[in-house]
Amino acid sequence: MILSERWDDEVVQQSAEPAFDEMYDVIVVGLGTAGSIAAIRAAQLGLKVLGIEQMHGMGGAGTLGGVTGYYFGTRGGIYEKVDQETAELEAALFQKAGGVNANAKSIVLERSAAEAGAVYFYDSTVLGVFMEGRQVKGLRWIGPEGIRSTGSKVIIDATGEAEVCALAGCEVRRGRSADGQVQPFSNVVQLLRENKVQHYYTDSGYVDAADPVGLSRAIVQSSLLETHLKPVYQEEARLLKIVPQLGLREGRLIVGEETVTFRDFIEDRYTAKPIFYAYSNLDNHSKDIALESEAQQDWSVVSSLWGLNFRLPIPMGTHIPRDTEGLLIAGRSLSLDHDLAGCIRMKRDMQKSGEAAADMAFLSITKDCTLKNVPYEELRTLLEETGCFEKDKGVEFKDSSVRTNNDFLACKWLTNPEEIKAGLASTKPGIAIWSAKRLGDRLVPRLLDWMANAEGLHLARHSAMTLGLLGYTEAMPVLRSMVKERDMFVPYTSRKYNQARGYAAVYLLGKLRDKEIVPELLDLIQDASTLPQMQTEERNWEFISDPQELYFQYFSYSVMALLRIADRHPELRESVAKAIQERLNDPELELKISFKGSRVIKYSMKERIAQLVRKRTEDWNITVQT
């Protein structure tokens, strides 16, 4: 047996012969949103359960983190009973709170775990993982009773950072492919207003939650921001506290036996054996969408579909680290791609993830089978009994070839060309753009005709954007005119975060590797004054708070388009790299963005863009002066 520990941020393994202090069926590490439900459910099923939590209470973001409301997710599962009991306890003992009462829920979770027979410790941290080959056998951890070694049949990693999985040597990934960046974090202020406990939050910055020094700095510095720590608080909004637990949206993701990706979703590939359904939009809080995947930009920038909700069937294998036994993941570290990490993280769904992991552990132990071989039908029966799997709402497929994401969307894709034409001619073109993209080559002759002969500007330009999505270079002249004009039209497709048509055209020309647009893009990054004034009347500008942010959007999309074009045209690489770097070297260049919930907090994106440019020029084997 070996003991795998972390020393100076490096995982170190050494031989060990542990004398386990005690044996458990299941150890749940992290008693937050997913882990508290996992511990309760496993204990209710009759398993001997140990819970380990580094904070001082259960419930994670929904209790200690002050995120008391629900943002989408699906109903059903044992968390519904917890929330019902929380409401009853609040009515009996607590000041009325907005959303789910955080203090009452923490008590209900503790009571439910204790009544079910689970043992749990707070202020406790995992130090190492005991393993035999790729089988996880137990943990070395420190808590109120000192350092202990505890064995188990199954460990559920609900840390939110896949820390146990990382210690066990499981493959993990973090952030988007361009630069490894995760979404911004938030923090919450708790106020007493109108005799009710209320919360508000702002996004406050970026942090690697696996870096303890950086995390500690973020906790302190973000709580001192003027959006939170004000010189004076009015009597009608009295400060109760700045919540110390950050709202971390994304961290490590495991590589599991199955992975769910956004590309799979948009290409109609789904599991036939879901254990629950997640439900949300592609809820990316970042404003540097130019650095995201092409799939996400196709969806959120060209089509402005940020706010379109969809259901995703989540398979069992997303909870099982690949090539590892005795270990499960629960919560936001599931085996997903970065794009979907913004969607499959909502509290309702993460509570379901915890319940599903507990059911999987129960069947593995009682059936004496590996986690990969847990019988799906029996697992689904357990999940249906509590409503964690919504039997009446689940979509059944006998033939995987007939599945389409029309079955999981809050809308239906269009198939009638005249309906698509009407949508493209409107101020809400997103559904029509994506519907036409899905039809592909079949609609191209009509799109070409609408682009060339349309009486209205919207129809011509939205047809060109759709053709650009489909890879047709015939769209380039119209797209170029949109860039040269700095087309400021912002559609109304999405409930929020619609994107301006001008820089959507920049993105598409980069996607098409258009050599002719290069001089225009170089001019654009050099001079912010070429952008027209933002007009607030009847505009949908919630994504862009001021002209500086508008320039950042054009700048970032132009830089990424130039890099893509130069990838295709090597003769342009040196001149493009030199021009971009000269602009980045300008000390007066500011590339700052604000965060959701505040126009006061500003974050410089200059170094992030510079790092991407340096990496690309190194790949080209070109040296430019920085």
Image (tube, rainbow, N blue to C red):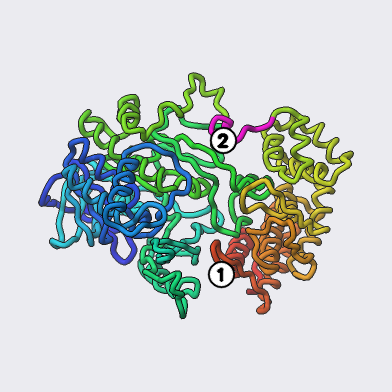
Is residue 587 in the magenta section? no
How far is the residue under mark 1 from the one under mark 2? 34 Å
Q: Determine crowd level at label 2: few under 14, some 14-19, many 20+ residues with C-alpha closer than 10 A.
A: some
Which amino acid type is shown beneath numbered disc 2? Answer: Leu
Q: Residue at x 81, y 32 (%)?
A: 446
Between 91 and 367, the one lying in front of the other is 91
Q: Which residue lies furthest to the top in this view?
A: 398
Percent position of residue 598, x then y: 55, 66
What is the quadrant of the C terminus in the image? bottom right
Q: Give the range drawn in magenta.
A: 405-414
Is tag 1's residue or tag 2's residue first in the polypeptide sequence?
2
The mark found on residue 409 in the picture is 2
SS for tag 2? loop
Percent position of residue 177, x then y: 53, 53
Is residue 411 in the magenta section? yes
The mark found on residue 603 in the picture is 1
Q: Determine crowd level at label 1: few under 14, some 14-19, many 20+ residues with C-alpha closer than 10 A.
A: some
